[in-house]
Image: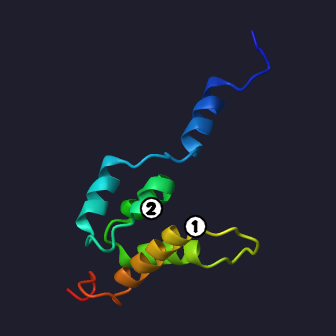
Amino acid sequence: MTHGGPSDAESRAHRRARPINQALPATLKWFDALPPEIQPAALLREYPRIANALARAGNDVPVLTAYLDSLLVDRRGGRRGFPGDVHRELQSLREYFDGRYPASPTTI
């Protein structure tokens, strides 16, 4: 008997496609490992799925900087952008992972 709605498999695939919009334990660990002045508190609060993606990259600096660049540079046109505090945190993270910040991972 079909009811015209999505199948169970389609429903599961749709649920998996949406990113988790809360900070994961690994993300909190990543956050805590950053220097306090670099910790992106506003990002974690307002965009936890983005913080999760950054934490998932771990210490892979090229992946982190490429992702941060994709967030900071509007290559598609018409993006609204992030609130000022989140934008500043993303910029600081970019500088930190690019080695332009004291005690950056590439300068230790």
| Color encoding of the figure | rainbow
Q: Residue at x 53, y 48 (%)?
A: 19
- Residue 83: give its label: 1
Q: Amino acid at mark 1?
A: Pro
Q: Position of residue 34 (x, y in %)?
A: 27, 69
Q: Quadrant of the C terminus?
A: bottom left
Residue under label 2: 42
The disc, 2 or 1, on the residue closer to the chain's N-terminal end is 2
The relative height of residue 59 versus residue 13 in the rendered view (above or below) is below
CB within 8 Å, label 2 to label 1: yes
Q: Tell how many labels.
A: 2
- Residue 91: give its label: none
Q: Residue at x 76, y 71 (%)?
A: 78
Q: Residue at x 44, y 61 (%)?
A: 42
The relative height of residue 1 versus residue 76 in the rendered view (above or below) is above
Q: Closer to the camera, 70 or 14?
A: 70
Along the horizontal axis of the image, is 105 left or right of 4?
left
Along the horizontal axis of the image, is 1 left or right of 50?
right
Q: Closer to the camera, 87 or 11?
A: 87
The residue furthest right is 4
The residue furthest top is 1
SS class of the residue under badge 2? Answer: helix
Query: Residue 59 appears in which quarter of the rendering?
Result: bottom left
Q: Position of residue 15 (x, y in %)?
A: 58, 36
Q: Amino acid at mark 2?
A: Ala
Q: Residue at x 26, y 56 (%)?
A: 29
Along the horizontal axis of the image, is 19 left or right of 9?
left
SS class of the residue under badge 1? Answer: loop
The answer to whether residue 47 is seen in the rendering is no
Along the horizontal axis of the image, is 45 left or right of 76?
left
Q: Position of residue 30 (x, y in %)?
A: 29, 61
